[in-house]
Amino acid sequence: MRRCYECNREWEDRNLFCHSDGTPLENNLVLNRKYEITEKIGKGGMGFVYKARHTDLGNLCAIKVLKPHLVATDYHAGNRFLREAKVAAQINHENAIKVTDYDVYSDYHFFVMEYLEGEDLERRISGGTTLSFQQDSNFLSQVCSALSEAHKLGILHRDIKPSNIFITSDRMGNEKIKVLDFGVAKILDFDETQITQTGAIIGTAQYMSPEQCNGEKDIDHRSDIYSLGVVLYQLLTGQVPFSAPSGPLIMVKHISENPRPFKEIKGNIPNDIETVVMRALSKERNKRQQTANELAQEFNNAVQTYESGLSPTPAIDTPVIPVNPPSPPNANIAVGSVTIDQRTQGDNFNAPISAGRDVVMGNQKRSK
């Protein structure tokens, strides 16, 4: 038997990792004779992520390992995991996380990614940190560039949010964005009914598009544009457009309510910039920017107009403190074609509704 030094549980000798917390059960564990595990750096709904070193080349990488019990209890788990790796591997772009290898070792499915040093956007803006309009535009441009490449390949991300936007640095020391976690991505014209749970709504409630919240099957790349609009709204005002005590209630607001005007929250944001963001947050897909690059260009133009002194700012600059909505009763809420028991949601409505995410990063050990 092997004992986990973290949780002190024992596992059969054939196990390489603790099934409970993902801790390696042997020192200097090497997968497939070439990936030496050095430390655990993240976890998600489907697996754990480790920092590793290639034994021959010496370079660092990140390895995502599928939880073995998922394969044992779900026939399609391995297929979903392989699909995630294939989707990410298709997107060959400097602003998207790179997947370089996939294999199965001693019944453990895993894939290999580039190792990143830095922090995600969620951590960057935590505690009320405000970015300049130019920084917002720079980050948006890079995210949109990666998404544009994915969209050209018929791939939708479906879970754009600050924690999936990672800030690292290039060789010149300039901040560079990497879009993470294509684990819940959708491939257009691909029938995923055989590898996803029937009726599952996929995404993170606060950043989901109305069509995602409705459970519509024909969502397209403009759903990602809406999610980017939510991220921009949060970057500029310090708040997401819609909040509520549970995920289902947030989803209802995405479908039926309009975001509060910027002047009610933070009044020093130029009108032109607000117009771009509110367009991205349109309930109807045809009224949003039609491509990711169009959104980036519109936002950049608005920022440049403001920087040149040609764009006025609203007169009101006193933030309005929002009133917390009342707690909902314990009941089932129907959202689109899916009914969700909000009593099972708890306080975890910031997490993905379906399919967990994994953190792939350096200088940061955190779970979602």
Image (cartoon, rainbow, N blue to C red):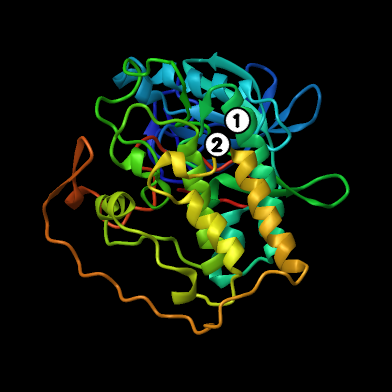
Q: Nearer the viewer, residue 104 or 229?
A: 229
Contact flag, marks 2 and 1 (Cβ < 8 Å): yes
* Residue 31 in sight: no
| 211 sits to left or right of 17 | left
Q: Against 266, is 191 above or below?
A: above
Q: Residue furthest front?
A: 310
* Residue 302 in sight: yes
Q: Position of residue 282 (x, y in %)?
A: 43, 49
Q: Quadrant of residue 128?
A: bottom right
Q: Quadrant of residue 18?
A: top left
Identity, as a three-letter code, of the amino acid under mark 2: Val
Q: Against 183, is 364 above or below?
A: below
| 284 sits to left or right of 340 | right
Q: Residue at x 36, y 49 (%)?
A: 205
Q: Residue at x 31, y 20 (%)?
A: 74
| 28 sits to left or right of 192 | right
- The disc at residue 63 is 1
User: How many discs appear?
Assistant: 2
Q: Position of residue 264 (x, y in %)?
A: 44, 76
Q: Which residue is mark 2?
A: 49
Q: Nearer the viewer, residue 220 or 202?
A: 220
Identity, as a three-letter code, of the amino acid under mark 1: Ile
Spatial separation of the CA atoms under disc 2 and disc 1? 5 Å
SS at circle 2: strand
2 or 1: tag closer to the N-terminus: 2
